[in-house]
Amino acid sequence: MILELNGVGAGYGRIPILHHVDMSVAEGECVGLWGPNGMGKTTLLKTILGYLPATQGSINFMSEDVTPVAAHVRARKGLGLVPQGRQIFPALTVLENLRMGAALSGEGERHVIEEVLEQLPRLKSLLKRTGGLLSGGEQQLLALARCLCGRPKLMMLDEPTEGIQPSINEEIAETLRRLISEKSLAMIVVEQKREFIAVLAKRVLLMQKGSIAGEMTAAELLAHDTFH
Ligand SMILES: Nc1ncnc2c1ncn2[C@@H]1O[C@H](COP(=O)(O)OP(=O)(O)OP(=O)(O)O)[C@@H](O)[C@H]1O
């Protein structure tokens, strides 16, 4: 397993949000995380990344107990995030955004960026463009590319299709599918759109009220009654 959580709890101040979360991700596996709004999916990603401390349980990443390890050290070890709402640097150019990501990789910046651009060729013609002037979809591709420039071993994506037009969502899904099948990159994908998760993840965890309430196959997810 590349990631293993055992009985993890976390919250904000004294408000507990996550309760006894057990989950694992195998090498090269893409796991979907699905559930209604406000159930703790983003909180779970923040806890795995170390932005929030686990108040209970343990987090194991690449055979190391990272529960006490600081977020920036976990990032260097290979935990990457494509955050909700993209969070690119709007005043920097596309290339500068990628350089920020590549600083984490510990490899030659130019080589890393060139390789990532081969996977996301649409960005090649946008390198000098200011990030804030890109469309939402282009910003999402940039956020994905920036994360890849840090050479993650496990990439977590928080609602990558939110507010993005369908044609770019297909491009994002296809890029992620290739990264899984060709590069064996492990992923956790938090998503509301079932069709998007089903294309990528064989195994989908259902999150409810801060706990993992069940596990489904992609086919079961597509057949699942919606929450609303
Ligand atoms: N910084 C914060 N301080 C206090 N409570 C928070 C904070 N961030 C989130 N919460 C609360 O934690 C709970 C879980 O939120 P979280 O964002 O993890 O859910 P989610 O499943 O990712 O939902 P969404 O899809 O809407 O982001 C919610 O009740 C939310 O109000």
Image (cartoon, helix red, strand yellow):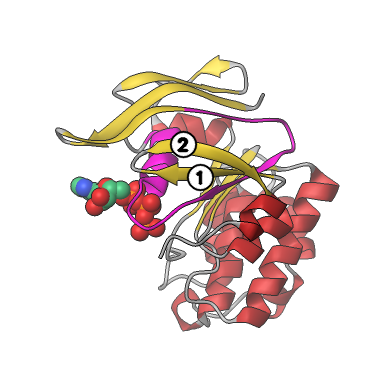
- Is the residue 115 above or below the residue 50 in the image? below
Which stretch did the figure color magenta? Answer: 22-50
Q: Is residue 35 left or right of residue 11?
A: right
Please tell me which residue lies in front, 72 or 128.
72
Residue 32 painted magenta = yes
Do we see residue 59 in this rendering?
Answer: yes
Q: Which residue is mark 1?
A: 206
User: Where residue 43 sits: x, y (%)?
Assistant: 36, 43
Looking at the rendered structure, the secondary structure element under dot 1 is strand
Question: Label 2: which residue?
Answer: 212
Q: Position of residue 144 (x, y in %)?
A: 60, 60
At which x and y percent is residue 5? 50, 25
Q: Is residue 65 left or right of residue 188?
A: left
Instruction: Please give the name of the residue rendered at 51% of the width and 45% of the height, measured from the top-left corner.
Output: 206
Kind of residue at disc 2: Ile
Given contact means CB atoms under 8 Å apart, are the residues at marks 2 and 1 in contact? Answer: yes
